[in-house]
Image (tube, grey):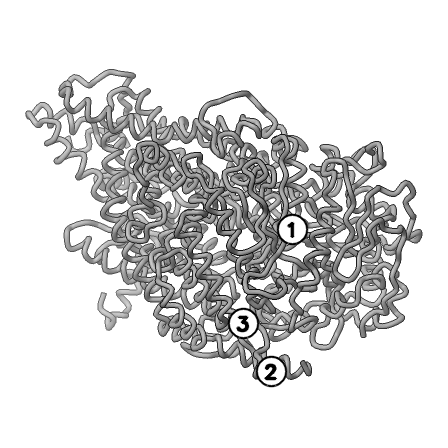
Amino acid sequence: MNKHEVTESSRARLGMRLRRDWPLLLMTAPAALLLLVFHYVPTLGNVIAFQDYNPFEGDNPFEAFLLSEWIGFGNFETLFYDPAFWDAVQNTLSITLFQLVFFFPLPIGLAILLHSIGSSRLRAFVQGVIYLPHFFSWVLVITFFVQMFGGAGLLAGQLRQHGIEPWNIMTNPDTFIFLVTSEAVWKDVGWGTIVFLATLSAIDLTLYEAAAADGAGRWRRLWHITLPALRPVVVLLLILRLGDALNVGFEQYILQREAVGRQAAEVLDTFVFYQAIVPQQWGLGAAAGLFKGVVGLSLILAANKIAHFIGEQGVYQKT
Amino acid sequence: MSTIAPAPIPRTSATRAAWEEKPSPVTQLGKGTILTSVVVAVLFPMWSIVVTSLASRQTINEAGGMVVIPAELDLSAYVTIFSGGQVTRAIWISTLVTVMGTAVSLLLTVLAAYGLSRPGSLAHRPLLFYFLLTFLISPGLVPSYLVVTGLGLKNSLWSLILPSAISVFNLVVVRAFFMSIPSELVDSARIDGASEWRILMGILLPLSKAAVAVVGLFYAVSYWNAYFNAVLYIDDNDKWPIQRVLQSYILAGQSPHVAGAPVNLPGITAYPPTLAIKMAVVVVTVVPALLVYPFVQRHFTKGLIVGAVKG
Amino acid sequence: MIPKYTPIELLKPDIPGEGLIPSGYLHYPTHLVDAITDRPARSGQAITTMSPAWGPNPPGLGRNAYLAAVNGELGAPINPSVQDGNTYADKLSAVLGARDVPHLLCVPSWEIDRIPRFSQAVKALFADLTDHLRGDAASAYPMLAALPTVAWQYSVWSGRLAAVPFPNSGPLPWALFYRKDLTDRAGIAAPKTIDELYDFGRRMTNPSKGVWAFGNLFNMVQMFFKCPGSKGGWRKKAGGGLEFKFETAEFRQALEFATRLFQEGMVHPDLVASKGADAKQLFSAGKMIAWEDGLGAWRGMQSEQSKVTRGFDMHPVPVFSAVGGEPLVWGSAEPVYYTFLKKGLGKERTEELLRVLNWCAAPFGSKEYELCLSGVEGKHFTRAADGSPVPTDLFNQELATPPQYYVLGGRAAVEVASADVPHYVEDLLAYTRATIPYLEPDLFHAIKVELPANYSKTIVTTEDKINDVLRGRRPLRDFDAIIREWRNTGGDEGRAFLEKILADNGR
């Protein structure tokens, strides 16, 4: 809409649209209100990113937010001048990228595979089993990997019995990215299939029937019906994952950080933990949070643009 | 409304639709191998967890850690966890929070997802961005605490529900499902004079059962696993949810460290939890997931016919 | 300003303590003293508290016989809020930041070290106790007046007495424990020199049997090489000024030695691979022979494991020096916890709360102590033949670790024998007695220090880099560069800051 057109007619149109759309607004209102109260109001506290926040300034906690010394972009400077911060950002993005390629497609493939099982009982069993590791803590997941592949683990024991000196899978910084990805796959591949299974189950079966009648084989049906049906959800999740590019997890890395060293295992969240949370530098932590938000938003906007370009809807639509 | 007739075609066990060809032996072998290895990769550790939770200390010491071959049936880890009633009580509290929370979350999410599902409606874009932005910037600890206590929710179970009631991720997923439904369905219903409410309840929801089930599962799991909000907002030890209570068993006897050095806590004898207790805690956490999944999964298996819209 | 020290001794110890060495009792007393006859709380108003615990969550008021019994003695309905000690920092920063503190707030000293501007928090949130407790005024609270002076000295913020301390009973943070039963069987004695320690590692490691000699032990190695430890590692230089342990030749030697242990595969791979690995389980199972932990780990593990493994016997390796002269050990007399009182409650209420803390601080030999630590006879414990309390299941369910009221008020430390660990008290006191003389004097004894943020952060970063050297990811020759970076990114700032503190205090 052109900005100069704020005229009688556009006001009338507004009235008409309001009359038409008020039920939609009403339906959106409760969720919006909850977010306002529990998200946006406390988010105002992020002003401390521009402060040397002192929680004990003034007579009450609100005064503390107002009266703490304003230092402009000082916290951001502290972050951006620290090479370790950029190391952490780089590690995080590498891991995200790596997992987008080697992890993201796996649940899709597995979901398609599961969907193709004829026996619904077998399918239910497999699904019910493979999503369980999602409920294990990272400590437990890593314990299993250590027991299998660690220097005192099953594999190493077998190798020693055959006179081979075992190599260090769990402590090698160069292969750490494979290790964390394997761990993540084991923990969450089953969990990740759920959204795709739901999507697949919504496909109109008559489409397959019609295609089969037209002589389309298994692979062609996969190509022309199954994959297109999955595409919007895949694109959506891909975009959301990109928005989350600077979050790759925390506990998994903090547990293995000493084993492979900071160079390989420092991600943004562990960096913020050691540099801002532990020493309780709240302003610095808030600045890092804002940085993450801005990067995430830019990535989502960019990815969405690309999605529109290739004819997908993405998270929000073209105007 | 007469234009649609969602009718499930039950795919009964081990039957194949008439139009489906028999898979080749190679395909079957490939599928079988992949699925078997995936299942074994989960079941083997799961087995080891259960066996360890039922093992005596001697057996665990002999194994040097996780036990694979069961030697006896020692229930003492479970007795420890369930004696005193705190865990049972916490299970009820978490069940209550999960059921109420999931209901609230699902209702609000479905409503908002529908409200946001029509591009071009009034304030559609700004509202959508309003939701998406929450996804990217998270509030700090102290401000959140101030809001929750300011509303008088401290020590109330609502403090475990309301602050985390809306997941924008889930909302966007439901919205995508709504939007993937052919718009002809909605349009024709509207021409017939159906209200928005009728369209949502009568057309979109029945067609999006799977999505709603998935998102319901996501919400339920996050309420069941909720931990940190309880740390902040629940002072009353009798109102702790299950994960908070279970965690207290796992962390028992861990001595705190001062600047990297452990502290001797006077008058306390530290008894670290046995590995059996830790594994019993895992079992207690996983069992509800096992119980709930079949109910969710039921909604996946029904192929839906989206009536004769175009015909 | 400090309360006048008026010791109470209800019982004669079998092994009298002195200074930082706790008193030892080899028998449980047959007669307990009723040390406090008045009801501490008279207003009948509820008192809110918050304290840390490391163990299962106990039931709250109304479902807990322990709380009912103690509240009956105190005369006030108290429903203690017990928070997980491992997430206490999060909870604390929320309640401090929102200024939503309970009447009695127990804060571990290590959490205080992490909170910037804590002295301002004290001013904004907590009652000034100076007038209630200074000098002779403390005689109104005899149990508090019996707390050691050094603990009170640490309880002063900005020149005012602000908290009731829980005195430190074990100034020695680390001990190197080893499985004496297993080494005896292998015919290897506890190492007395650094070469013997290395030899111990070589001979006890046997990967094909799944056994490794060591867990983490870098802190102990640093002590063997006599690295300084005041406020994390400072000492006075010969020519004046301070130097940090990273800058000393001793640290470099310690690092070189420990690196060799890692390189030659003497450290258990599970512990090398994950922070979440369970060192105590490996030690109990005999898969790892020696590792460093707090002395507090001793009693519980010895008691539990002797029921499981016949002859299980763990001991601390006596400290020795790797660089000649007498050995050196780190330690600090700083209290373990502080209990703060909420500000602005009025004189009478504050006095009431102090009387409650006075009750909680009753020492060993009193009925109050037994109730506070062990609960009610017949419910929470039964008596062994020698009269000592034997905990029941109800004890484990209803009392937190540490017990809800016990943690609020400290008392002089004691070690009391029990049948499950027959020689423990003698062994512990013998080790403590042999080790305390080598305790490095704390340069910052009884001084409140709020370290600059840059300094604290650079310690973390530098320890990461040193860890890289230790694990063999970086060569030892990088060490000089690491130390240079440390100096430039906050190390020198910390040095100047601490030197000024010492100068201000005339040390």
**Quadrant holding the N terminus of chain C:** bottom right
Q: Are marks 1 and 3 on the same chain?
A: no
Q: Which chain is mark 3 on?
A: A
Q: Nearer the viewer, mark 2 or mark 3?
A: 2
Residue C156 shows in the view: yes
Side of A314 where C475 appears, left or right: right
Report the amino acid beneath label 3. Phe
Report the amino acid beneath label 1. Leu
Report the amino acid beneath label 2. Lys
Which residue lies under the disc numbered 3? Answer: A65
Q: Position of residue A168 (x, y in %)?
A: 33, 45
SS at mark 2 in the image: helix
Which residue lies under the disc numbered 1? Answer: C295
Q: Which chain is mark 2 on?
A: C
Q: CA distance from mark 1 to mark 3?
A: 43 Å
Determine which of the numbered discs, if any, sits on residue C500 in the image: 2
Q: CA distance from mark 2 to mark 3?
A: 31 Å
Side of C77 where C270 appears, left or right: left
Q: Front-most of C59 and C210?
A: C210
> Which quadrant of the view contains residue C219?
bottom right
Q: Front-most of C137 and A11?
A: C137
Residue at 29% from the left image edge and 28% from the top image edge? B37
